[in-house]
Image (cartoon, helix red, strand yellow):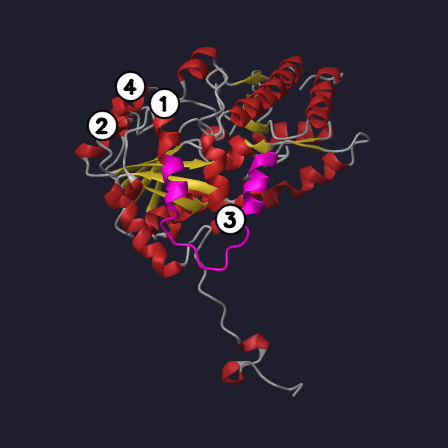
Amino acid sequence: MGDHQPTGGLTPDELVLPVSLGLPDFPWDALAPARMLAESHPGGICDLSVGTPVDPTPDFVRQALSLASDAPGYPTVIGTTEVREAILAWGARRNMVDVGLSGVIPTIGSKEAVAWLPMLLGSSSDDTILFPEAAYPTYDIGARLAGAIPCPVDPTRPETWPDARMVWLNSPGNPDGHVLTREQLRAVVVWARAHDAVVASDECYAALAWDPELAASGVPSLLDREVCEGDPSRLLVLYSLSKQSNMAGYRAALLMGDPALVNAAVQVRKHSGMMVPAPIQHAMAVALHDTEHVALQRAIYADRRVRLLAGVEAAGLENDPESVAGLYLWVRDPSGALDAWGLVDRFAQLGILVAPGTFYGSAGSDRVRVALTATDERIAAAADRLAADPTPI
């Protein structure tokens, strides 16, 4: 019995490993030395390197999850009517075009959709996928998983873009916090329709605007009625409840847009089992209908941002003036003395862990991304250390 061999009689050393997808190393693994340095600080580490929420999931959301926990049957890929109606109501509040129940589905976090959407829509090795030149790495990875060609571009200059099958937008942007105007979004729509391309807009930070005028008017959506002129054809929007509702652990997100494209994704997902658990769907619906908790969480992040900005400025650093929304500061050394990794090391000496801008493309070679997603106490500690540093960065 103890000498039983794997199927086919191969020893473990003889087993053939899966073919490599040729993916790059996971970027955050490279932060291990900086993490060790930051952890050695007498006051402990202030980890501002990732955008994972730390505040409690609202009680009413947790109660909704509990009430729906008796779920013996399989959920459907398209989602319940309850959650799809909640998605449509959320979209209406953002002035998004009504795509109907067939134009919305829940997804297993927005990262699932970012990573797999090109493949779900049939992209192949003959296709080019565009994404912002400063961008969350998964846009690039999603193109590679589909066998397509990833291509970073300036999202504000579609006239310079190469021909492509699909375009990713990210507004507000991760890492830079930039927000595309309605006019800029409209220019992308015009370009895409002239090139028969799909546009997918990742808008997961839309509830977190810091510019006063932008906060009052709302972050524009690709599916804004004025942007798309009431026509959602070949347009898709992603959104996540991770940030607005502290539901990252729930993996609760959505896809909304052209019903034909949503249906194409659904048909593949039916075969692959990408189903959002039923209790999560109910919790999503409840959270999407409530705006009060979103405003409260935004206020918490606003206070942390003010505190952290003061520390950054006291240290002689500069936040990108166009970083007007989202969960991050996009920081550089205005003297040019320190590049991205030099800044990572200097922050780590103060016990603060940040992410080098190179994780997000060559456009971040002289910047670091500083997350607001830490407790008030850790944000205050980081800001104080920056302000008190005797040798400003």
Q: Which residue is mark 2?
A: 230
**Which region is colored magenta?**
58-87
- Badge 3 marks a residue whose secondary structure is helix
| Residue type for callout 4 | Glu
Q: Which mark is residue 183?
A: 4
157 sits to left or right of 214: left
93 within the magenta span? no
Could you give the CA–CA distance between mark 3 and mark 2, rounded to whole angstroms?
33 Å
On screen, residue 295 above or below 106: above
Q: Label 2 near label 4: C-beta < 8 Å? A: no
Residue 250: image location, x then y, percent: 54, 44
Residue type for callout 1: Pro
- Mark pair 1, 3: CA separation: 31 Å
Element class at badge 1: loop
Compare residues 341 and 201 and report the one nearer the observer.
201
Q: Residue at x 46, y 52 (%)?
A: 23
Nearer mark to the viewer, of 4 and 2 = 2
To which residue does mark 3 refer?
279
- Viewer-closest of 315 and 201: 201
Disc 2 marks a residue whose amino acid type is Gly
Whether residue 315 is situated above or below residue 191 in the rendered picture: above
From the top left corner, tell me how far across and down residue 298 is, in percent. Answer: 55, 23
Q: Earlier in the sequence, mark 1 or mark 2?
A: 1
